[in-house]
């Protein structure tokens, strides 16, 4: 066999292994298995691609490995064809390869992760928000000094997470997400009537200090309080991921 080919192959193998072992850490993204909202018109629930792929891109482009977990594992439903950064991360950053093989909760060890993120789409309100195993993983990452992030409807899946002291994780902390005032004006889930919870109500009920558009300088602001990073709307999906990385690196100092 050609000696040069052998050397090149060994170098490529070394670089591949080196990239895996020198990663900055791992981040867990939580996604939903729910495809519709249970109504006869089959309103789509699932996950919004443009609310998960951009944060994934931010994490991996900053040197973090990313894993996905869903309540039942395997492939998860996404809305919308890929455009922009979603197309890029699918083609060059193995997004589909990862997300189409999401782990089940029993396959996840929270100690392996520096942060956990829940993206948008209605799906997480239907299954993630009530999945005790995933809630336990989120609590474990948080109590282990990790960062918790969510935006859009994702923070609704954080509302019911309980810590080891029996308190809700969001209690006494400023948080935000897709607000009631906007939900009731949208036809996507029949003005919220198809939803199992209104995330603003659930966050408030469990002690979260919910930030409305009136509380923020800009409706796209990111709210950060005691290692919980949340935001309301789509334009901030990548920004909340970047802010999570900043928080991770603060904890490492």
Image (cartoon, rainbow, N blue to C red):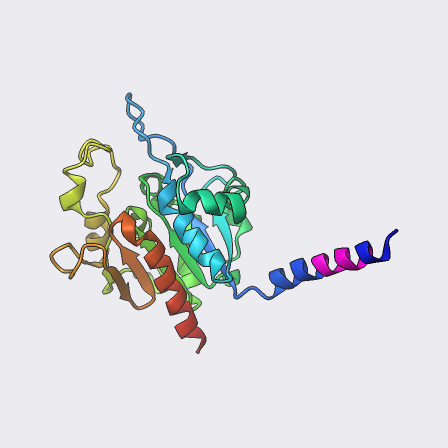
- Looking at the image, residue 63 sits to the left or right of residue 211; the answer is right
- Segment tinted magenta in the rendering: 6-13
**Residue 9 in magenta?**
yes
Residue 176 in picture, x, y percent from top left: 23, 55
Query: Which quadrant of the figure has residue 46?
Result: top left
Q: Main secondary structure of the magenta part?
A: helix
Image quadrant assignment for residue 9? bottom right
Which residue does the image show at 61% across and 61% down from the upper left? Answer: 19
Where residue 226 sits, quadrant-wise, is bottom left
Residue farthest to the right? 1
Q: Nearer the viewer, residue 219 or 26?
A: 219
Estimate the x, y position of residue 133 in percent, counting from the top left: 44, 49
17 relative to 79, above or below: below
Q: Nearer the viewer, residue 111 or 167?
A: 111
Position above or below: 161 against 39: below
Res. 235 in view: yes
Left or right position of 226 against 33:
left
Q: Residue 156: x, y in percent?
A: 29, 48
Outermost top residue: 40
- The residue depicted at 25 percent of the width and 49 percent of the height is 233
Q: Nearer the viewer, residue 162 or 76?
A: 76
Q: Residue at x 20, y 53 (%)?
A: 205
Name the outermost residue toward the left: 214
Q: Does 21 lie within the magenta span?
A: no
Q: Position of residue 229 (x, y in %)?
A: 31, 61
| Numbered-mark total | 0
């Amino acid at each position: 066999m050609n000696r040069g080919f052998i050397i090149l192959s060994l170098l490529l193998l070394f670089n591949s292994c080196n990239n895996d072992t020198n990663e900055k850490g791992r981040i867990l993204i939580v996604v939903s298995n729910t495809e519709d909202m249970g109504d006869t018109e089959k309103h789509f629930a699932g996950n919004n691609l443009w609310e998960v792929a951009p944060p994934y891109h931010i994490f991996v482009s900053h040197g973090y490995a990313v894993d996905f977990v869903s309540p039942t594992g395997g492939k998860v439903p996404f809305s919308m064809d890929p455009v922009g950064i979603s197309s890029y991360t699918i083609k060059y950053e193995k997004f589909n390869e990862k997300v189409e093989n999401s782990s089940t909760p029993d396959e996840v060890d929270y100690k392996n992760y520096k942060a956990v993120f829940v993206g948008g789409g209605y799906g997480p309100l239907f299954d993630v928000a009530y999945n005790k195993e995933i809630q336990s993983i989120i609590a474990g990452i948080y109590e282990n000094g990790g960062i918790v992030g969510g935006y859009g409807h994702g923070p609704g899946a954080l509302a019911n997470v309980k810590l080891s002291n029996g308190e809700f994780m969001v209690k006494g902390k400023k948080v935000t997400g897709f607000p009631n005032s906007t939900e009731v004006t949208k036809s996507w889930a029949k003005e919220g009537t198809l939803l199992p919870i209104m995330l603003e109500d659930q966050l408030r009920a469990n002690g979260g200090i919910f930030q409305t558009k009136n509380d923020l300088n800009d409706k796209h602001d990111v709210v950060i309080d005691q290692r919980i990073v949340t935001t309301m709307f789509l334009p901030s999906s990548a920004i909340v991921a970047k802010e999570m990385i900043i928080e991770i690196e603060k904890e490492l100092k």
